[in-house]
Image: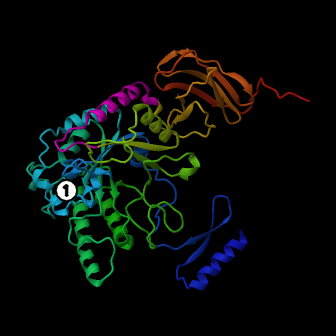
Amino acid sequence: MKRSLTMVLLMFALTGASTTLTIAQAPDNTPRISMTLEHGAHRIGKRIDSKMSRWRNYGFGQFIHWGLYAIPGGHWNGEYYGGAAEWIRSWKGMPNEDYDNLYTEFDPVDFDPKAWAEQAKDMGARYMIITTKHHDGFCLWPSEFTDYDVTNAPYGQDIIGPLVEAYDAEGIDVYLYFSVMDWNHPGYRSKLETAEDREAYEGFKEFTRNQLLELLERYPSTKGLWFDGTWDAAWKEQAEFADNLAMEMREMIPGLIIGSRFRPDDYGNRHFDSNGDLMGDYEQGWERKLPDTYEDTKGNDWDCVMTVPENQWGYHSDWRGHVKTSYELIEMLVKSVSLDGNFVMNFGPNGQGEIRKEERQLAKEIGEWMHKNQKAIYDCGYIDWEKQDWGYYTRNRESGEVYMIVFNKPINGALRIKTPAKINLDKIFDLNGPQKTYRPEEIHRNEYFIHLDEALLETPKVIVIQYSEATNQTKGYDKAKT
């Protein structure tokens, strides 16, 4: 460790780096090189306020990708586009001018925000994320700062306001998706190569700021912002601007939740700054993938946003390849919560404002399971008991109850439980039938079997464990002596 530290310090000396370096102590008391960053992480560790605690306890959310891209639905002039539907404007088969004029056709006569909110409630979602503006720049709210918005489309009405109202009425918190990337704005640049680029981009930055403050002013019940399109080289140069804007937005809505996608640090790093510390209130790096272990999350708050087909966010009329089942999505939800994260399932309504029947069916099936088993999801998170092949553990953060969510029944029906030392298993019973109790069979020290009677599990089963910590524990099991 000393040799590595010396080599790193020498490297900075030889390169003439002006960054201040300090030697801090890591949790394991080993030296850690820490850069002095003006726009890096402003907090080490989790937010512990009530609004962030509420976010942490959601468990399950809904994402809605909706905009002009729903009109072509992954096709143009009879040709199939195999990419993500909301990126069709970037396809050589879609002339930009044709796409940019799709707003003249945007008239979703079947849009019913109350029905959307009721479906989300029935599914079990506790929060939702809606695309206010995607990369194409078309705004689903009446924006003072552009004509490229819903009021100039045939629909002519605000989309976001009625959605916020409907979801608020169902007790579902609303988060606003906003793409910094904007193909429609004349000042947008993906990289800044000339003085003219930089001058144009200054106007684009002011436009971006104005729109974000406008959204928060129009929809003050917003709980947070979900950013996208921040990977461009041009935006990575905007550490000071983005940092100041984040503070300005937080002043408008105290407790506003912003994930790790929004701002770069002094060296253009996103998500984690140059010291490896999380920027933002939770990690947004888990898009269409899940961590394998708790260690992969680095102890941070995080969420996973997931599509139903492999890579379609906006409406694509032609789903090809694997389409996830409700069983798969429930397992992803449970795994997320078991690792202290939230799981967010995406929906892509069509150009008329309808949620497709396949997504409605999935929402119904997931909702049926959540209605019976939500106690194992809501307000729950990680517990450091060794995971077993039958499924996952979650733990209620208030009551301390542990839930076994069983997906795989062993052939012998015996579910293995391995606990830390000095744990008493006080009571084990079915969540949906507390009269059904299980007597743990001790097979090794701190290791037990409980035995299932069911011949077949039709849906993931939840078993409750109530336990206590023993100071003077005695065990019936003793190791064999040789």
Rendering coords of residue 137 (x, y %): 22, 60
Question: x, y (%) of residue 424?
Answer: 67, 28
The kind of secondary structure element at disc 1 is loop
Q: Where is residue 373 in the image (x, y as percent from the top left)?
A: 44, 27
Image quarter where the C terminus lies is top right
Q: In which quarter of the image is residue 217?
A: bottom left
Q: For the magenta stretch, what is the residue range?
A: 348-375
User: Which residue shows up at 83% across the image and 29% down it?
Assistant: 479
Q: Identify which amino acid the numbered label 1 is placed on.
A: Cys
Asked whether 199 falls inside the magenta stretch, the response is no
Residue at x 86%, y 27% (from the top left corner)? 480
Q: For the residue carrying disc 1, how many other residues have a C-alpha within 10 Å: few (<14), some (14-19), or many (20+)?
A: many
Q: Residue furthest right?
A: 482
Residue where numbered disc 1 is placed = 139
Image side of residue 120 versus residue 396, left or right: left
Q: Which residue is drawn at 20% across and 38% down?
A: 354
Determine which quarter of the picture holds residue 163. Answer: top left
Report whether 164 appears left or right of 472: left
Please tell me whether the stretch drawn in magenta is mainly helix, strand or loop.
Answer: helix
- Residue 392 location (% of width, % of height): 55, 34
In this view, 376 is above or below 134: above
The quadrant of the image that shows the N terminus is bottom right
Q: Does the magenta stretch include residue 364?
A: yes
Q: In the picture shown, does residue 366 fall above or below 29? A: above
Image mark count: 1
Quadrant position of residue 364: top left
Q: Is residue 351 above or below residue 444?
A: below
> Measuring 61% from the left and 24% from the top, which residue is drawn there?
410
